[in-house]
Image (spheres, helix red, strand yellow):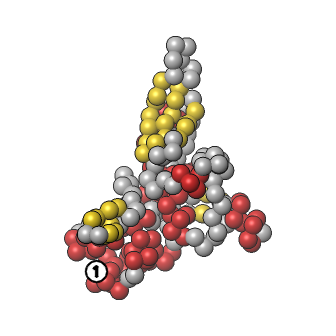
Amino acid sequence: MFKVINKEGLEKIVDINTHIDFRQENFNQTQDFIHEDERNRNFYYNRKHLPIFSVTDRLIRKNQAYKSAFYMMESEFRHQDKSIYEFIFNIDYEASYMETKKFFTDLSFSYVSWRTIEQIAENPKIIYDLNKDAIKNINLTILPKCQTAMHKLFNYSEVVEKLFENAVKVVDNEKDLEYSIPYVVS
């Protein structure tokens, strides 16, 4: 079996062990995929280098890895004992070497986002004090136990509405998706 991805971000696992023809095992539409960034690289093993403090871009990558693993894990890893955490918690050796000469643990959340989500749960009005970038990072955060801001704040419809509004941009009175909010099963 092997994975392939096309320029629209449609990812497939193909079984080449069948003697007659190739058989598609699973597929996934990679969210927030930018073909220009990945054109001359291997999407799975040689992605474009991200600076350490590119928090939003790193969260987008974590969401791509989560979704790919979630939808494709069944066929790809059915004979292996792998956890979803292996795909979203790792060490970025390239960033470590390039900038700090130290190990850099790359997680799907930051303490700041985690704590902000907890504070919003205690006082929902805090959401109105946050800027667009902070809300975007909260939306893209996957906490331990594969929980998101939506899991933690679902009882506050006003907050959830604000989180979704942040993901939409309006251009010439037309609404369009600016980024994808991850759908995470926990």
Residue at 25% of width from left, 69% of height from top?
A: 173
Q: Is residue 122 at least partly visible in the picture?
A: no
- Marker count (numbered): 1
Relative image position of residue 118 (x, y in whole percent): 38, 76
Mark 1 Cα shell of 10 Å, populated few (<14), some (14-19), many (≥20): some
**Residue 141: % across, % down:** 45, 65
The amino acid marked with disc number 1 is: Pro
Most extreme residue toward the bottom is 129
Closest to the observer, 91 or 3: 3
- Residue drawn where x is 63% and y is 53% of the image: 47
Based on the displayed image, in which of its 4 quarters is residue 167 positioned? bottom left
The quadrant in which the C terminus is found is bottom left
In this rendering, the answer to whether 36 lies above or below 126 is above
Across and down, in percent, residue 40 comes to: 65, 48
Give the image location of residue 129, x and y in percent: 35, 86
Task: Spot the residue most to the top.
Answer: 20
- Circle 1 SS class: helix
User: Which quadrant of the figure contains the N terminus?
Assistant: top right
Q: Nearer the viewer, residue 160 or 117?
A: 160
Residue hosting label 1: 124
Q: Residue furthest front?
A: 172
Report the residue at 43% width, 77% height from top.
134
81 is higher (above) or lower (below) than 49: above
Residue visible at 51% across and 22% down in the picture: 22
38 horizontally vs 183: left or right: right
Question: Is residue 33 visible in the rendered structure shown here?
Answer: yes
